[in-house]
Amino acid sequence: MGEALEPSKLPRHIGVVMDGNGRWAKKRGLPRVIGHQAGMKALERIIDAAKEIGIRYLSVYAFSTENWNRSSSEVQGLMGLFRYYLKGKMEQMHRRGARVRFAGRLDAFPEDILKVVAGAEQRTKDNRAIDVIFCVNYGGRQEILDAVTRLMASGYEGPVTEECLRGFMYAPDIPDPDLLIRTGGELRMSNFWLWEGAYSEYYFSDVLWPDFGKSELEGALVSYAGRERRYGTA
Ligand code: FPP
């Protein structure tokens, strides 16, 4: 299918809601955290595939502000995975030429995770093959509230325009997502890139995230390439 993807019709930025880890595990009679582990492997495959295809920005919804309400064993399991991933895999990401970034209310995370987050951003900041943005403790409404709070604290007194508010968002230099993908069969975006996704194209897949691979990604890209984006014009 690779040849069918014309570079001019590729999205620059893809955002992904990686849903279905829990159901993937349940179907196999396994604990949910094993589903998240499989989800982490799927994420590695998708980062490689996206880079190979020529996607410049890939953002993934790894932990939402609502995810704290899950059982403490699941939250602990996810924290353990982040630790493992951040400490063990960042060098690999660096070698792949990936720039690693984070978006969300990071201060809620334990000190050791914050340290590796800062280290990973610093270590990979000059890489240009692909930017991978991990949205952690991210919520779209919270992002807008945080931006307004920071705007007010800045002492700014001019008119509040889209451009000026955008400057206070979590990742103002990253282009808005062209394509938002959600796996796992649910038809909603659950507070992901609320502001930035205003004109994004949506793509929903029934495939559970751990089973989502390069060919599923290509399916989403073929669908995207066939769409006409008008941004509200006739
Ligand atoms: C949604 O599936 C997935 C999450 C809440 C977490 C996403 C985490 C990963 C893909 C793995 C770890 C990532 C990193 C960055 C190390 P769900 O649990 O809601 O699935 P369900 O809808 O089937 O219950």
Image (tube, helix red, strand yellow):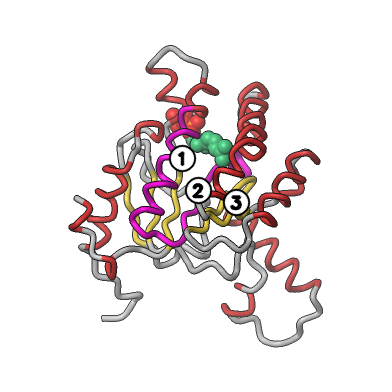
User: Can you give x and y, in whole percent of width and height, for residue 37 in the image?
Assistant: 51, 27
Disc 2 and disc 1 in contact, CB within 8 angstroms: yes
Rendering quarter of residue 152 = bottom right
Rendering quarter of residue 64 = top right
Look at the numbered disc 2 and say if its residue's Cβ is closer than 8 Å to ligand 1.
Answer: yes
Mark seen at residue 60 = 2
Q: Is residue 64 visible?
A: no
Q: Is residue 203 visible?
A: yes
Mark seen at residue 69 = none
Look at the numbered disc 1 and say if its residue's Cβ is closer than 8 Å to ligand 1.
Answer: yes
User: Can you give x and y, in whole percent of width and height, for residue 80 in the image?
Assistant: 66, 29
The label nearer to you, 2 versus 1, is 1
Q: In this picture, which residue range is highlighted in magenta? A: 38-67
Q: The disc labelled 1 sits on which kind of residue?
A: Leu
Closest to the observer, 205 or 113? 113
Magenta stretch contains residue 139: no
User: Can you give x and y, in whole percent of width and height, for residue 142 in the image?
Assistant: 65, 55
* Extreme residue in the top direction: 29
Q: Which residue is mark 1?
A: 43
Spatial CA span between label 3 and label 2:
12 Å
First reached walking from the N terminus: tag 3 or tag 2: 2
Residue at horizontal 28 percent and vertical 55 percent from the top: 221
Disc 2 on helix, strand or loop?
strand
Rendering quarter of residue 147 = bottom right
The label nearer to you, 3 versus 1, is 1
Q: The disc labelled 2 sits on which kind of residue?
A: Val
Mark seen at residue 139 = 3
Look at the numbered disc 3 and say if its residue's Cβ is closer than 8 Å to ligand 1.
Answer: no
Residue at horizontal 45 percent and vertical 45 percent from the top: 17
Disc 3 on helix, strand or loop?
loop
